[in-house]
Image (spheres, rainbow, N blue to C red):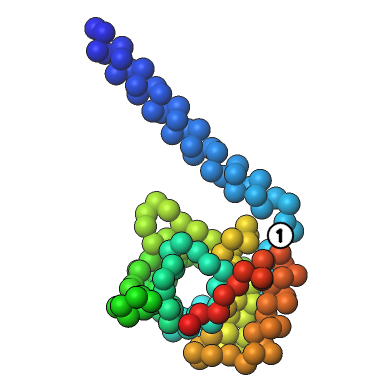
Amino acid sequence: MDERIQLCMTTRIFITLAIVFLIEIPLKVYSESSSLPPLRTVEKVELSRYLGRWYEIARLPNSFQKECQKSRADYSLRDDGDITVLNSCQDIHDGSLRQSKGRAWVVDPVTNARLKVSFFWPFRGDYWIIELGSDYEYAVVGTPNRKYFWILSRAQTIDNSLYEAILQRAGQQGFNIGSVARTE
């Protein structure tokens, strides 16, 4: 009988901790981003034009791209209408290819500018297209909490004046442009 009571108490503690954890994370994210104005996205994204290869021009530093150079992303349409995401980079130490495959899906079908992306179930993150070249020659992607930010291009480089203008507009949206690093 004593073991059953202990098992019941352990189960209750586990369930309570899980509930607290599941409630605390969204509240923390909300409190971190609630002081920021809403992140503006582009008015419309034609997903068929957005698919293909993008080269990373710059990014805010993040843990999952640490020690990466020559980063790129390849987007392709899946049979179910979602998007396959294949991120690749070279390891800065030995030059080996590092890849991560994920799935993205549209959460705002009116604009197609707000997506979720997941590389490891059940974890997912925001992928909001906040700027896009008129010919889809470049794209700027960020998250509402301003923690993640990328400048992408169809070419491996972009004009420096365009780069500086993108950074200025990103700063007006609340991104810490002083921490943005160009991709090698």
Rendered position, 164 above or below 4: below
Position of 149 compared to 93: left or right?
A: right
* Residue 74 in which image quadrant: bottom left
Residue closer to the observer: 137 or 164: 164
Q: Nearer the viewer, residue 6 or 65?
A: 65
What residue appears at the point 72 percent right and 70 percent down from the top-left corner?
171
- In the image, taking residue 150 as reference, residue 67 lies left or right, namely left
Q: Secondary structure at mark 1?
A: loop
Who's the residue at 67% across and 80% down the image? 166
Q: Nearer the viewer, residue 32 or 103?
A: 32
Left or right of residue 144: residue 88: left
Q: Which residue is tagged 1?
A: 38
Q: Which amino acid type is shown beneath numbered disc 1? A: Pro
Residue found at the very far top of the displayed protein: 1
Instruction: Give coordinates of residue 121: x percent, y percent.
Output: 37, 54
**Residue 41 in view:** no
182 versus 148 height, above or below? below
Look at the image and tell me whether residue 32 can be seen: yes
Answer above or below: position of 153 versus 105. Answer: below
Residue occupying the point 35% across, 69% down: 100
Q: Quadrant of residue 150?
A: bottom right
What x and y, as percent, mark residue 69?
43, 78
**The N terminus appears in which quarter of the rendering?**
top left
Q: Position of residue 50 (x, y in %)?
A: 51, 81
Please tell me which residue lies in front, 95 or 32: 95
| Residue at 41 percent of width and 71 percent of height | 67
> Relative to 81, does residue 124 appear above or below in the rendering?
above
- How many neighbours does mark 1 have within 10 angstroms: few (below 14), some (14-19), or many (20 or more)? few
Q: Position of residue 88 (x, y in %)?
A: 38, 76
How many numbered marks have been drawn onto this rendered protein structure? 1
